Image: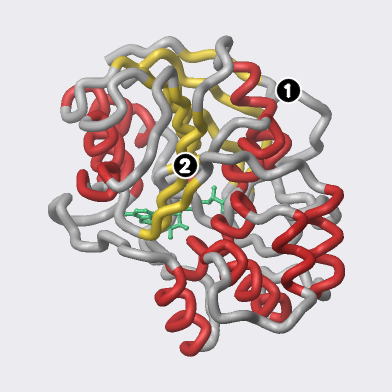
Amino acid sequence: MGYRTRAYGIPGSLADYHPDAHEAIERWFTMPNTGNSRAVADIIEDLVPMRPAAVVDPFCGAGSTALAARRLGIPFVGVETDPVLACVSTAKSLCGPDDGQALLELPEADESPALRCLRLVHRLQHLPGGGRLSAQMITEDLSRGAPHVPGSMVVRGDSTVRATWEKLTLPDGELVIFTSPPFFDDWTGPEVPPQVRVEAESLLAGGVTQDSYPAARGYGDLLVGALRAAQTVVPHCTAIVEHEPGSGPPDRLLEVADRLTHEAGLEIVEILETSRFSPGGLFSLLVCRL
Ligand SMILES: C[S@@+](CC[C@H](N)C(=O)[O-])C[C@H]1O[C@@H](n2cnc3c(N)ncnc32)[C@H](O)[C@@H]1O
């Protein structure tokens, strides 16, 4: 099927699409496919004329979309299957200056999940992906970064499962999905000591993790599965989806677009070819309507 395709210059003056190692909150923890939150915010503002009621990311990883929503002052709703990354996104999305102050004090029994995720982020600092920041620096980031936005949430679970979407609290009104499904089939999440993973699993309540989408779980399966499940709770929404060369030969993007059309019944609005590099190479954006 033919799709409207155009060259797209990402707004702003970023030289690339990598996370900014000096940017407050962004620098806490990243992984190879983490994007730049300012670029994500610019893209959302550029492509979506009306201010959305929430920004949703069903594969939210280390939280570049979460932070983009925070920059825009819009509630963020995220889903992430990896418990450590779900904690990172939770802390980036939900923590405010009070949590930063509490991080400097001894833990208390009744701390919120967000604060406990922030403590875990602090413990990740000397692992690959961690910014090597002290608790004091994390606390400073929360004072000088964008304010956290009430109504934001992150659920640990499988976004291809309808039950996961039913756990989300979504505001009325037009929503935007901005997401990067996994580009590489063999990626298994950040390398952390087993006790950190166990702790992360205990922090975020009630993940829905069973497989409901059959067979292989590559980029296309995950994206089609997630947007199909999303449709059960999100009737009207623009979805902006990143596609990297790592997710298959260039024309694989068109196969994914065909699957979104035929299996999920979505309207492909356009395919944007960028000249920017994400960690996997030049990337495209697929824009569709639920
Ligand atoms: C390309 S990464 C997202 C990068 C993200 N934008 C960031 O800022 O770090 C894709 C993420 O999807 C997660 N994932 C994989 N399968 C999933 C599923 N079924 N449901 C939810 N998340 C999933 C992976 O753990 C990974 O963190």
Q: Residue at x 26, y 59 (%)?
A: 208
Q: Which mark is residue 11?
A: 1
Where in the figure is residue 18, as x and y percent of width and height? 71, 48
The quarter of the image holding the N terminus is: top left
The quarter of the image holding the C terminus is: top left
Q: Residue at x 70, y 62 (%)?
A: 99
Q: Quadrant of residue 277?
A: top right
Crowd band around label 2 with a 10 angstrom C-alpha radius: few (<14), some (14–19), many (20+):
many
Q: Quadrant of residue 157?
A: bottom left
Kind of residue at disc 1: Pro
Kind of residue at disc 2: Val
Where in the figure is residue 257, as x and y percent of width and height? 32, 26
Q: Residue at x 48, y 61 (%)?
A: 86
Where in the figure is residue 84, as x and y percent of width and height? 50, 70
- The reply, left or right, for residue 54 in relation to residue 45 is left
Nearer-the-camera pick, 171 or 45? 171
Nearer-the-camera pick, 194 or 169? 169
- The reply, left or right, for residue 33 in relation to residue 276 is left
Residue 286 visible in this rendered orientation of the protein: no
Q: Residue at x 40, y 54 (%)?
A: 155
Q: Which residue is mark 2?
A: 77
